[in-house]
Amino acid sequence: MITTARSGADTLKALKYLYGPGRRNEHTDPHLVASWDGFAPDPGRDGEATLDQLRDALDLHVVRYGRQVAKHVYHRMVRADPTDRNLSDEEWGAIARRVVAAASIATDGDPDGCRWVAVHHGDNHIHILATVVRADLTQARLRGDQYRTEAELTKIERELGIKEWSDTRTPQYRAGIPKRPKSPELRKAERLGQEETGRARLRTGVRWALAGAVREEEFLARLTAQGIRCEVRRLPSGDARGYKFALPTGEPGPPVWFSGSQLAADLTLPKIHERFAAGIDDPALVGQGRPATVRYRASTSIDRATATIDDDPRAGQVAAVVSGTIEVLDTLALTSPVLSRKEINQAARALEFTAVARTRAARAEARVMRSVARELLYAGPAGGRGEEGTAAATILAGLILLAIVIAKWHAARGHQHQAAAARAAARHLRTAYGRHAGRPIAVLDTQGRQLPQPARDRHETQARRALPADLAARVLADQGWAALAATLAEAEQVGHDALALLAQAAGQRELASADSPATVLTWRIRRGAQLPAPAPIVTPEERRTGAALSRTATHRTAGTPAIAVSPPSPPLYGPDTGHRAR
């Protein structure tokens, strides 16, 4: 169920709407299903009752109050899911009584509660109308009523066996997702021709600066490099209270500041300091290894994170994996070539809506994912072809599966919107993956189809022996089977046991959700066996680009990131933002 409330100053006007035809003639048979004492006049069913009489009864305590009450009308709508059964008047009446009690309009056993009515007029929803002056001539204390009524409706849904209409209304969901822009922000972005609001661009910039940072000084320096202003708000004692951030405006007047909590729940000072406290696994690895090597290493950690959710689905573990995955995606967006950067960035933004709210993240899992992000950042920009393109395809394949597992975890708990956001992230990652994997998979597919028939038969037998029967059937029917067969043949040529490689790759979990399990096995085997990238003809331009990137990696120092983060400026996801690495 969903519920929303509003206030007003005209009881009769509200009643005319509830008992009238509606804005589009959608109101049918309006009538009372409950009231403060069960005896309120009902103009819908009693031919002698009038709206004026009902108004006078509701306003009795307001008139007795003796002075004007600003917006004394309390109007709350409660709606069931359209696919649920129609609830009876008795059920709606019981729901109304529990809602007004939860909202502190009229609690159980309180003779001095406010006066209220509940009107049902079709479409499986009711309207609760109340006046906020109690019989003891005090005003009802309604602060926090939305949270209390939502919690009560959750209980009602479980008791009645009906579906949650929208988890976006729950406090748990709102506490975890990024803060949505307000109407003036949206209008300003539209007026300036910007794809996103300043708040959204600022949030992305803060996340870019945070991705892989292990100290506050580093985080603040990277904000400055983007042109983002940051100030630490302090208590009278001098202790840090929180951060506030602002984008450069380029216009006269003061900047528009947002606190960390106004950007996202995990961008407050305490939450950011929790990340720093988690540390990283092996500082010696930072700055060591080429971009392709680091991506292969990172994909192994991502596979382990996927298995973590499968093995230990506690909320704290999942919270750490989700937070860390966003950080990994941010560093990938910063270091990936243009052909996949936009989709990776969009995947990160979609995954922000899958946060597990009000849960302390497991520090060990957070440390693992932050370590991956830092290694990727310091490895520097990667190209989109050759070995680096193959490594990018490998890590993206792992991230797709991780996003799918996150979606399944949320769906199993009834978190409809979080699951949908995770699936959206997986779609963006599939697009990015296709841009890197297309050429190498095509090369492997050609090689697999050219294998002699005895070799193809041998690899088919190996697949049936190494894999469970249902998985083997899927793999052999998969359009990626030829590429996997070519990989097995290549591994055998350099001395590997293809049967053992298949069993090991399949044992790394979560293939049931893969669109192409054969392709996932291909990348896992190539990574584990350290096979070179499939080698199509390399153009002179690609050779020169690869050489330039190698020189960049050779001359960098471990103490400085291999990239400098560009300031987010409109349009944020345009083709020329960030650092170009072709």
Image (cartoon, grey):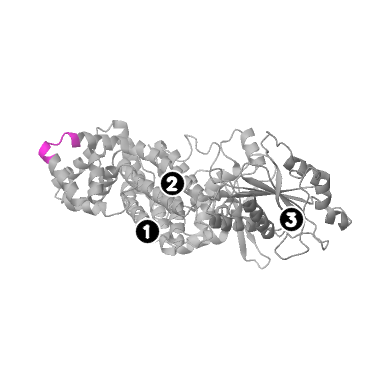
Mark sitting earlier along the chain (1/3): 3
Q: Which of the two residues, 336 or 506, is positioned nearer the viewer here?
A: 506
Foreground label between 3 and 2:
3
Can residue 208 be seen from the camera position used here?
no
Q: What residue do we see at 16% from left, 34% from top?
A: 450
Magenta span contains residue 266: no
Mark sitting earlier along the chain (1/2): 1
Q: Is residue 196 above or below residue 414?
A: above
Left or right: 89 as drawn, with respect to 74: left
Magenta span contains residue 454: yes
Q: Which mark is residue 563?
A: 2
Give the SS element for disc 2.
loop
Tell which residue pokes out farthest to the right in this image: 66
Q: Position of residue 115 (x, y in %)?
A: 77, 56
For the C terminus, give its image quadrant: top left
Q: Which mark is residue 229?
A: none
Give the amino acid at mark 2: Ile
Give the amino acid at mark 3: Gly
Give, as a single range, the part of the protein colored magenta.
448-455
Give the amino acid at mark 1: Thr
Prevailing secondary structure of the magenta residues = helix
Give the SS element for disc 1.
helix
C-alpha span from label 1 to label 3: 54 Å
Q: Which residue is mark 3?
A: 38
Q: Position of residue 116 (x, y in %)?
A: 75, 53
Corner quadrant of residue 338: top left
Q: Which residue is mark 1?
A: 308
Question: Contact, CB < 8 Å: mark 1 with mark 2?
Answer: no
Q: Is residue 486 above or below residue 323?
A: above
C-alpha span from label 3 to label 2: 70 Å
